[in-house]
Image: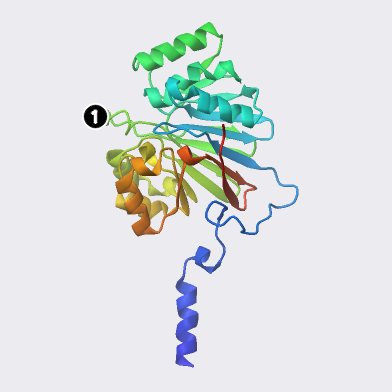
Amino acid sequence: MKRFLALIVALMCLPFCALGEDAVINLVANPNAEWAFEEGAEILEVFFPMVKGADACILRMGDEVMMIDAATAGQRDRVKAALEYLDIPKVDVAFNTHPHDDHIVGFQYVPETAEIGKLVITFPEDANNHMKNTLRVMEELHIPVGHAKDGDVLRLGGAELTVIQCSTSWFSENNRSAMLMVRYGERSILMAADVELDAQNELLKTRPEVLDADILKYPHHGVAKAGWNFLKHISPEVAVITNGRYSIKNTRKDAEKRHLPLVYTDEGAVRLRTDGKIWVLDQIVLD
């Protein structure tokens, strides 16, 4: 009897997801997993093109489309392939996390494939030449430019995207890059931009509650390990790495120690879909 009671107590102490109620159905790891979306539910789609060492992500819900970063000029064909695969003629909102070339320059080439309704930036318009050149192209194409700051909420259908940005003046541009917490129903994904240890630790100290998420877009393409406590607090079920597995040896080893599954965008476009109840993750190789 005592053993039976001890087993019951142990089961009660397990995380909810350990009882078979995972939020993420990972078809990359288990192609035969069974799943079904709630009947009649609107689906939020989060699509990472096959970029490497750069960021680009396309979000779609119904007829509304948003794009978070657009990679480099050299990888514009990879972004184009994703837009064409998804049959997207217009990006309603293009959002830039910070003005490094591997995040912002690709927006100059998106209009060759899909119209941009509006560009939203999170740094000053004169931040650097990458920003200035991109804004020049937007002006030439008569694309309006807006600004977003920490705490702002953008909407995409029934999903909310909250800007999380540290403004500490002495932080690097990477640490001041704007993260986005994407929430739809009970599900969430943290788009962690390029935040490094300074910003990670600042957020853990001042407002850790904004970091809770099912899935993590790993910060800075995984070129450096995310902080131990940062990952421990988020405890994602899976992380998306916008890079190749052989470019991030230390990050890969750290994830293995944590039993954190990783998916890599250079091995195939990463597609996430949710009805607000579950995530379904799969991977598609694009030409």
Give the residue displayed 43% in from the left and 22% down from the top: 74
Left or right relative to 60: residue 241? left
Q: In this view of the protein, which residue sits in the foreground, 205 or 34?
A: 34
Going by the picture, which residue comes out furthest to the bottom?
A: 1
Give the residue displayed 37% in from the left and 56% down from the top: 256
**Dot 1 lies on which element?**
loop
In the picture, which quadrant includes the C terminus?
A: top right
Q: Which residue is mark 1?
A: 170
Going by the picture, which residue comes out furthest to the top?
A: 140
Q: Decide if residue 285 is in sight here.
A: yes
**Where residue 88 appears, x then y in whole percent?**
64, 27
Q: Decide if residue 125 is in sight here.
A: no
Give the residue displayed 53% in from the left and 47% down from the top: 188
Three-letter amino acid code of the residue under disc 1: Trp
**Where residue 81 appears, x then y in whole percent?**
57, 28
**Where residue 54 appears, x then y in whole percent?**
41, 31
Going by the picture, which residue comes out furthest to the right?
A: 40
